[in-house]
Every structure is written in C-alpha cells, then in structure tokens.
Image (tube, coloured by chain):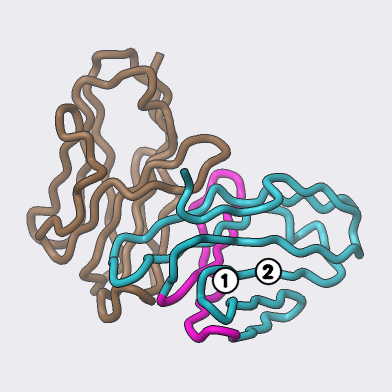
Chain colours: A brown, B cyan
Amino acid sequence: EAGVVQSPRYKIIEKKQPVAFWCNPISGHNTLYWYLQNLGQGPELLIRYENEEAVDDSQLPKDRFSAERLKGVDSTLKIQPAELGDSAVYLCASSSGLAASTDTQYFGPGTRLTVL
Amino acid sequence: TQLLEQSPQFLSIQEGENLTVYCNSSSVFSSLQWYRQEPGEGPVLLVTVVTGGEVKKLKRLTFQFGDARKDSSLHITAAQPGDTGLYLCAGAPGGSYIPTFGRGTSLIVHP
C-alpha cells in the first residue's frame, strides 16, 4: 500500500513569490493534516480536514496561507506571498478518522521550503 | 510555552548504552504517542499509550505513561546506531482533537 505522497520534495523561491504544496493521503483515510516543522522543533498543526471540511484551522495564518481539499482526497497548501520566515518543512499526514484522539497518523516525507 | 516539554533536547551516546527521554506536561492527556523521525523523512509512530501507569515494550524500547496521564518516558536498552533519530512525543490534551507535538529529543548513537 502506498504511503502519503507529497510533492515537491524541495522548493526554493524568492520572497514575495507564491508556492504550492500537494499531498495525496493514504487511500481511504478521511482525515488529513498539514503541519509546519521548523529546524529543531516538533511539527505544528496548520490545518486538519475531515473529508473535505476544514475542522481545525486556527493555527493557519490566513492572510497568506490557504488550503483546500475539494473532493476529500488530495489536498493543496498554498502560500502567497511567501516570506523569509516561511522557510521550513511542510508535512502532510493522514489517518482513518475513526478515533480522533488515538488515530495513527501516517506522515509523508515533507516538502522542504527555502525562501530567499 | 510548550504544552509538551521533552528532555533532554540532545543526547549523544555510544552503542550499547542505555538512555531515557522524558515528555512532561501540566495538562492531562487521554493518550500520548511517541514517534521517531529520521532526517528527510516524516515522523513514524512507535507507540500509543492510553492508560495511566501503562507500560509498553517494543523490542529494546520501553514506554511508560504516568499515573496521572501528564507525562511519559521512553527507555532504550543497549542503544544501536539504528536508533539514531529525533524522538517526538505528541498528544491531544483533555477533550481536544488538536494534536500537539513536543520539540523532540535528538539522539545520536555512535558505533
């Protein structure tokens, strides 16, 4: 069974440019998460989807970040415009959604963003 | 302020040594999870502890959940170079469904 797929793996852009990350979760997983991970830190939740509905997005900086999961399967996270401080690894994870507090989250390899 | 405090932040040891890393909070968690993350990869779940006082073993790794469900520990016996990685604890406090991660313990095991 394929794991969580993310692309691109690496992205280098100049500040003020837009950037988008794509995530394809494990087949059948209803819950999808986007995390930001800074160097030397643990992942921080940006947004959580149950199917196509964003149920936790309080940590998403909505002035420049947006996300969508239109058909409840794959998802896109966008930053426009990017700032230097956005340089980080963006992780996507999915889970079955059967038991929110103990669900196993399966993580993708992440997209490493560098903003110059 | 981190909801989950992990210690130590860094650990560099020789192969064969034992070690313990800690995950502490002032909040009660319905469950805590431990992950290991290798460079360039996403975290991989090692174990979920649910019951206060619970002990789970995974080969040379022993996980314990505190009686009050506010803390957890991970003990590795006879560490091997393959244990090298970032160990993260995570959980959703109280009735929240928002998962929170600690900053992690970066472990290096030298051959």
Q: Is residue B25 left or right of residue A112?
A: right
Q: Is residue B73 magenta?
A: no
Q: Does the magenta stretch include residue B42?
A: yes
Residue, x 50% and y 86% (percent of image)? B51
Which of B53/B74 is in front?
Answer: B53
Rendered view: B21 above or below A22 = below
- Parent chain of label 1: B
The amino acid type found where label 1 is placed reads Leu
Residue, x 28% and y 39% (percent of image)? A21
The amino acid type found where label 2 is placed reads Leu
Q: Residues within 10 Å of mark 1 (few under 14, many from 20)?
A: some
Name the image quarter holding residue A73. bottom left
Tag nearer the camera, 1 or 2:
2
Q: Give the residue number, with chain letter if any, for mark 2.
A: B74
Name the image quarter holding residue B36. bottom right
Residue, x 40% and y 30% (percent of image)? A113
Give the magenta range: B30-53
Question: Where's residue A41, x and y in %?
Answer: 52, 42
Q: Give the residue number, with chain letter if any, for mark 1.
A: B46
Rendered view: B55 above or below A44 = below
Q: Are marks 1 and 2 in contact (CB under 8 Å)?
A: yes
Rendered view: B91 above or below B48 = above
Residue, x 29% and y 66% (percent of image)? B96
Q: Which of marks 1 and 2 is nearer the N terminus?
A: 1
